[in-house]
Amino acid sequence: MKILMSNDDGVFAKGLAVLHETIASEHDVTVIAPDRNCSGASNALSLHQPLRIQRMESGFYSVNGTPSDCVHLGVNRFLKEDPELVVSGINHGANLGDDVIYSGTVAAATEGRYMGLPAIAVSLVGKEGKHFETAARVVLDIIAKLQRHPLPANQILNVNVPDIPYEELQGIKVTRQGRRHRAEGMVEDTDPFGRQIFWYGPAGAEQDAGPGTDFEAVASNYCSVTPLSVDMTAYQSLDDMKAWMAK
């Protein structure tokens, strides 16, 4: 299978290298990734600057843009043939619950789906990043399943893997998104010139982390696989909204 691989941690990230090594053992993989860490970039596109692509010694391609730029450029112009799958990751850190709104990792996958391709986003849940190999093996397993049972045309898979040895995984759970509490306040400080600056504070704690959620699965040492819809229309509200507008 021809696979386009990207991430948001940047072209030099360990998770990307480990994922490539594992997946390339069985598939034809091209890596196009940002030249820097783009965590939190969401679906941003570089509309006001030209994009440049450079081949690295590793054979990976580096782009001076966002994760979405990398996938868009790869599919729409750079690759001679369309890939059959887009894989984004391995992100160092969770993309659970509300995180998917901001995640550049998930955004690279959704960009692939916008381009008409099936896509997977994968993250390793933990601060230390010891077991990227576990997440890579999980992705290899999921790719095999997707070859037999393709994704619906409007969905991607958001995969979160606990940072433990592969042998300690309890299995894979299909989950729904949980939800975090409101994020903690901004951190106010001053720069060396005495000017006021602000930093984002920690992400909010889990609010909805009960049975069936991605939070609950990972906390129980399961891999969480959440199908995400690219079409964000709130279909359950359409009839009520039409009636409200008609009044």
Image (cartoon, rainbow, N blue to C red):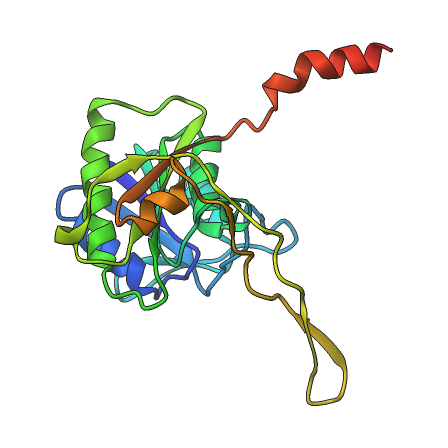
Q: Nearer the viewer, residue 79 or 225?
A: 225
**210 and 99: which is toward the camera:** 210
Outermost residue, right side: 247
Q: In which quadrant of the rendered view does residue 27 lie?
A: top left
Left or right of residue 138, residue 239 in this image: right
Q: How many marks?
A: 0
On the picture, is 191 further left or further right than 86? right
Residue 50 drawn at (x, y percent): 57, 55
In this image, 112 relative to 138: left or right? right
Q: Residue at x 36, y 31 (%)?
A: 118
The C terminus sits in image quarter: top right
Residue 80 visible here: no
The quarter of the displayed image where residue 224 is located? top left
- In the rendered image, residue 106, in percent from the top left (x then y), is placed at 45, 45
Quadrant assignment for the N terminus: top left
In the rendered image, residue 87, in percent from the top left (x then y), is placed at: 33, 43
Q: Is residue 189 above or below residue 166?
A: below
Residue under the image location 22 percent in, 44 percent down: 138
Query: Residue 109 location, x and y as percent?
Result: 42, 41
Q: Does residue 217 lie above or below 92 as drawn? A: above
At 46% from the left and 65% from the top, the residue drawn is 36
Q: Residue at x 34, y 25 (%)?
A: 151
Q: Check the image and report above or below for 86 versus 246.
A: below
Q: Is residue 146 visible?
A: yes
